[in-house]
Amino acid sequence: MKFDKYHITPELKRSLSELGFLKPTDIQFKSIPQILSGQDILAIAQTGTGKTAAFAIPIISMLQNQRYREAEQNVSALIMVPTRELAIQIKNVFDDLAQHSAIETLAIIGGVDIEPQILKLQQGVDVLVATPGRVVDLVHKGNLNLKKINFLVLDEADHMLDKGFYADIQNLLKFLPRKRQTMFFSATINETIKDLAYALVSKPVRIQLSPKDPVSKNVDHAVIFVAMDDKRFFLERVINEHSDKKILVFVRTKVRAERVFKAMERVGIVSATLHGDVEQEQRFEVLEAFREGKTKVLIATDVSSRGIDVKGVEYVVNYDLPDVAENYVHRVGRTGRGNHKGLAISFCSDEEKPMLTEIETYLTKPIKTMTLQHTDYEETLAISEDNPHDWRALMKEANEEPVKKKKK
Ligand code: ADP
Ligand code: MG
């Protein structure tokens, strides 16, 4: 079924066609009619399957019809997400889809000036995409009234209902009207979170696609066993062998992100880092440069593991395994998005083997292992310009030496 056949506004159909969205993805096909009919839903579908538009399309259509009826502008949809970058990204999806509709959107995020957000709220906003902390601030300061919210979406729902955010979400729910439509979207979910979600809504419809394998079918993923100290040589090799590709590298901590950045710099590889200690303005700039392809290698912590949709990321490297098993699914899911294919490789050291087992238990299947011959392993270390034991470089030097002398 094509989007033409949906009961959505003509302006929205026009935007969809301009964006090249001809027909809905599976999750969109299943969710859009349910949302349009007023249902609460819990939707689980793999990474990169178009969950954003699955809620944005029906919300924009319903908001537009509502705006036809009542000219008054109210904050009517609240989309909650875990990171600031994701808030901006989703706001942009709403803007693209609503470009021919009179729908005002705003991202409410921390780490940036609050005043412009307050000003924009005063001018009238229909859709807010937000990280919880700043919404709590604005509500408590009296600058944001959530009483007219019709639609609440928790994207990355399992994460939003998990320890770090749950208190804020609970707090905010007190300010929302009881009569509203609530939607949960995620690629991963567990029983505890499911119960929490069900406790917040009445009779939600559950839509779950491909529950057997949480990793997107578009992602070819494998693990390679590498000693902790040798990881940088393997990263260098992966990057050099795919120098024309965008590569997203995940590390365990902020400190390690900077270290890996420096190690790459020493061998002449340009990269950028994105983690919680990078200033917010710079975080946006770094991600923008990666989106535009000006930066080819981005070294990030799990702050970028969820939801981020960057065109052309063909390779994900788990330089370190994630601390939390489900983050494996989210990290490798930064590639293989839409109908693109992607590759993901994880470096696993001896110390990380218990974590690998945990991830495989979570996935309910082993991850393919890439076995390296001993010589291959040695060669990877040897071809690095940074390696003191680089026999090739030594031989090259030895060979060049007499030539230089002859010239004199
Ligand atoms: P998810 O939230 O499921 O991980 P996103 O909503 O970020 O996925 O979408 C993944 C990619 O798919 C985006 O680049 C988006 O533009 C694209 N996309 C979404 N819906 C469609 C569609 N119906 N047709 C073509 N591309 C789509
Ligand atoms: Mg998403």
Image (spheres, rainbow, N blue to C red):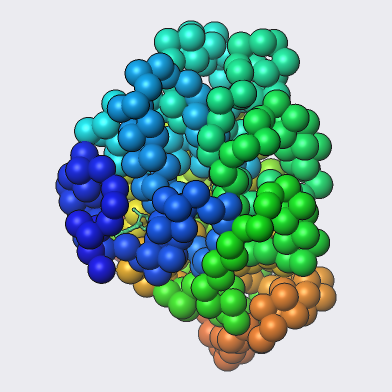
Q: Quadrant of residue 186?
A: bottom right
Residue at 50 percent of width and 29 percent of height: 76
Q: Is residue 400 left or right of residue 362?
A: left
Q: Is residue 397 left or right of residue 207?
A: left
Q: Position of residue 32 (x, y in %)?
A: 41, 56
Residue at 58 percent of width and 73 percent of height: 214
Q: Nearer the viewer, residue 324 or 32?
A: 32
Q: Nearer the viewer, residue 116 or 8?
A: 8
Q: Is residue 14 above or below residue 144?
A: below
Q: Is residue 217 left or right of residue 95?
A: right
Q: Is residue 40 above or below residue 363?
A: above
Q: Is residue 195 left or right of residue 222?
A: right
Q: Quadrant of the C terminus?
A: bottom left
Q: Is residue 335 visible?
A: no
Residue at 69 percent of width and 11 percent of height: 141
Q: Quadrant of the N terminus?
A: bottom left
Q: Nearer the viewer, residue 254 or 203?
A: 203
Residue at 27 percent of width and 31 percent of height: 101
Q: Position of residue 336 (x, y in %)?
A: 41, 67
Q: How many marks?
A: 0
Q: Is residue 59 visible?
A: yes
Q: Quadrant of residue 212?
A: bottom right
Q: Position of residue 143 (x, y in %)?
A: 61, 11
Q: Position of residue 339 (x, y in %)?
A: 33, 68
